[in-house]
Image (tube, rainbow, N blue to C red):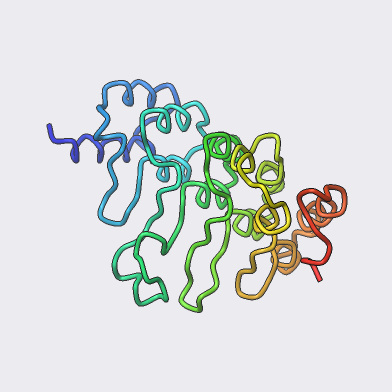
Amino acid sequence: VSAEYSAARLYKAAEYSAETEADFLEMLRACGEAEVKHRDGSGWTVLMQMARYNDWPEAAAAVIERGCDVNAVTGTKDCVGWNAPDFTICKDTALHYAAQRDRHKTVKVLLKNGADPNIRNIFPNGWGSTPLHNAAARGHEKTVKALLDREDNRAYANIKDDRCSRTDLVLRRVCGKFPDQIAVANGFSETANYIREKRQSDPPLFHYWQWN
């Protein structure tokens, strides 16, 4: 059985064939390193598939431990026409998918294992969204809180300049809007208020001048 075939089975298990997290973990134990690290023709990993369809934190941690790239991005060379000079940076990470689908337990696991919350996907108009934009746009409050909780986020550990790096998580615009503005536009005022309260109560993370 080829590694590619086994990887395809693992992808399907993450999407629908594994009924429980325990079922998936049992299948994972039978897979080798090549299957776990495999990326398909569009750049997808089993971690992305899992983040999109299930909130299985233990399984996500196990896949990462086995070598799956937590910051891998989707995309094909066709994305070059989308203002992306390198196809490897043109779309989404596992954290994007987890945030979009409100997999807040998985979000915490991804962040603890080095997922970069500042990676933006690329849209045809040149603006990209961070995982926080994805969560805010859908009013996923638990996921928004997970993304803004520095205690759970090892990605902050190596950031030395609060002003230029930590604020990127919230302040990068998508289609000209901040995450709180997108939440308001979509009718999720409570989510927007949490983001705004966070910027006021946590000075090391947010700086007022960057919100003006």
Q: In terms of depth relative to the viewer, which is nearer, 52 or 74?
A: 74
Q: Could you tell me residue 126's position as x and y percent?
A: 50, 76
Q: Residue at x 42, y 28 (%)?
A: 65
Q: Look at the picture and state if 136 lies above or below 178.
A: above
Which residue is painted at 47% across and 47% down in the image? 94
Instruction: Say which quarter of the image contains residue 138.
Output: bottom right
Answer left or right for 148 relative to 107. right
Q: Point out residue 168 in the picture as x, y percentages from the top left corner.
A: 65, 58
Is 182 placed left or right of 52 in the picture? right
Query: Is 37 placed left or right of 133 in the picture?
Result: left
* Image coords of residue 135 (percent x, y): 63, 53
Task: Please say if 203 is above or below 176.
Answer: above
Q: Quadrant of the N terminus?
A: top left
Q: Name the foreground residue: 157 vs 189.
A: 157
- Kindly indicate the quadrant of the structure image that contains residue 11: top left
| Residue sitting farthest toward the left | 1
Residue at x-position 46% and y-position 33%: 60
In the image, residue 19 lies at what x, y percent?
41, 29
Q: Is residue 79 above or below residue 59?
A: below
Task: Count how many numbered circles sit on residues in the image.
Answer: 0
Out of 55 and 132, give the one closest to the viewer: 132
Question: Within the image, what quadrant is residue 155 found in?
Answer: top right
